[in-house]
Image (cartoon, grey):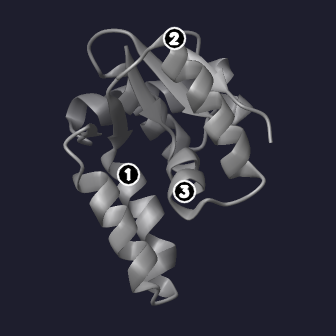
Amino acid sequence: MILFLDSCVVIYWVEMAEPYYSKWIKTMQRINRQYPRAPLAVSRLSILECLVCPLRENNLQTYQTYVDFFANPGVKIVELDARVIDLATQIRARYRLKTPDAIQAASALSLEGSVKFITNDAAFTNVPKLSVVNFEI
């Protein structure tokens, strides 16, 4: 089992943003009981989405925390290759997700094996092949 993290989840985790962080931790504890030591994955887009705000605000400490998170060997980065973009195009057309969300869904679906897509965005549940774990805020 691979746990694919939506960008918002990475932000909640790294920045410990409440009330999201507490709910995220409870969700991860439940998931870890089911799938201990499951690898994590994010899309290359998540790096962009997570680093923009710390750079804009010149918050070098938070920026470095994100860099360290993404550099962790336990976090797989899904590259935005032609296959992912083609799949994202189909997802956007069929399920009317926003472009970044379609890219996230396609990135998760491009992984081999079983994948749980972790988010708090209910829009992802519209993608039938995506196994979504949605925690409420």
Residue 86: quadrant of the picture: top left
Is residue 130 visible to the viewer in this orientation of the structure? no
Q: Secondary structure at mark 3?
A: helix
The residue to which callout 2 is attached is: 34
The residue to which callout 1 is attached is: 45
The residue to which callout 3 is attached is: 11
Q: Earlier in the sequence, mark 3 or mark 1?
A: 3
Picture coordinates of residue 75, whole percent (x, y): 28, 40
Residue drawn at the location 35% of the way across and 42% of the way down: 43
100 over 84 or under it: above or below: below
Picture coordinates of residue 130, whole percent (x, y): 52, 16
What crowding class fits label 1: few (fewer than 14 Cα within 10 Å), some (14-19), or many (20 or more)? Answer: some
Q: Tell me the amino acid under the disc marked 3.
A: Ile
Q: Tell me the amino acid under the disc marked 2.
A: Gln
What crowding class fits label 2: few (fewer than 14 Cα within 10 Å), some (14-19), or many (20 or more)? Answer: few
Residue 125: quadrant of the picture: top right
Q: Secondary structure at mark 1?
A: helix
Q: Secondary structure at mark 2?
A: helix
Q: CA distance from mark 3 to mark 1?
A: 13 Å
Q: CA distance from mark 3 to mark 2?
A: 23 Å
Q: CA distance from mark 1 to mark 2?
A: 28 Å
Extreme residue in the bottom direction: 58
Q: Closer to the camera, 82 or 18? A: 18
